[in-house]
Image (tube, rainbow, N blue to C red):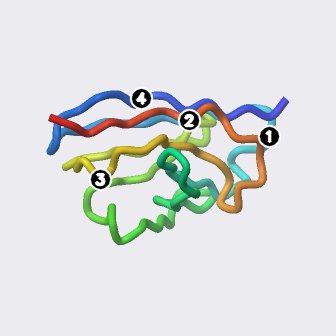
Amino acid sequence: QVQLVESGGGLVQPGGSLRLSCAASGFPFSSYAMAWVRQAPGKGLEWVSDTESGGGSTYSADSVKGRFTISRDNAKNTMYLQMNSLKPEDTYVYYCNTRYGKLPWGQGTQVTVSS
């Protein structure tokens, strides 16, 4: 069945880095544009970044541009989000899905930026 599993979150100090992973299975991953989104408790989803199916083109929200880098390895059915220069306002649960959120959501991975 279709499955998205996010991992790599944790507690990090401001200015630190994390690398999130999204392991995909049950669908033709390499055919889909994929995205990272994030959500605070009781709030809606916020788009962070996405990448075309081949990984050649990527797009990011202004709030993370220059700090976060999205990438994917289609041979491993995995997408990544390298997060550098983290700020307290990056504290969210991070989720991956197709660009338009068409697949069942995974459990997400919590990122907490705090000193």
Tag nearer the camera, 1 or 3? 3
Single out the mark in the foreground, 2 or 3.
Answer: 3
For discs 1 and 4, the disc positioned in front in the rendered view:
4
Q: Is residue 11 above or below residue 71?
A: above
Which quadrant of the rendered structure holds the N terminus?
Answer: top right
Q: Position of residue 91 (x, y in %)?
A: 35, 44
Q: Are marks 1 and 4 in contact (CB under 8 Å)?
A: no
Separation (CA) of disc 4 from disc 3: 18 Å
Please report the residue visible at 18 percent of the width from the left and 39 percent of the height from the top. 16
Amino acid type shown at disc 1:
Phe
Type of amino acid under label 4: Gly
Residue 68 figure quarter: bottom left
Q: CA distance from mark 2 to mark 3?
A: 17 Å
**In 3D space, how far apart are the residues under numbered discs 1 and 3 (Cα atoms)?**
33 Å
Q: Earlier in the sequence, mark 4 or mark 2?
A: 4
Circles 4 and 2, Cβ within 8 Å, touching? The answer is no
Q: Earlier in the sequence, mark 2 or mark 1?
A: 1
83 relative to 58 in the view: left or right: left
Name the secondary structure under disc 2.
loop
Question: SS for tag 1?
Answer: loop
Local SS, label 3:
helix
Q: Marks 1 and 4, how far apart in space?
A: 22 Å
Residue where numbered disc 3 is placed: 89
N-terminal of the pair, mark 1 or mark 3, is 1
Say few, some or many: other residues with alpha carbon within 10 Å of mark 1 (under 14 / 14 to 19 / 20 or more): few
Alpha carbons under labels 4 and 2: distance apart: 10 Å
Q: Secondary structure at mark 4?
A: loop
Q: Give the mark nearer the N terminus: 4 vs 3.
A: 4
- Residue that badge 1 annotates: 27
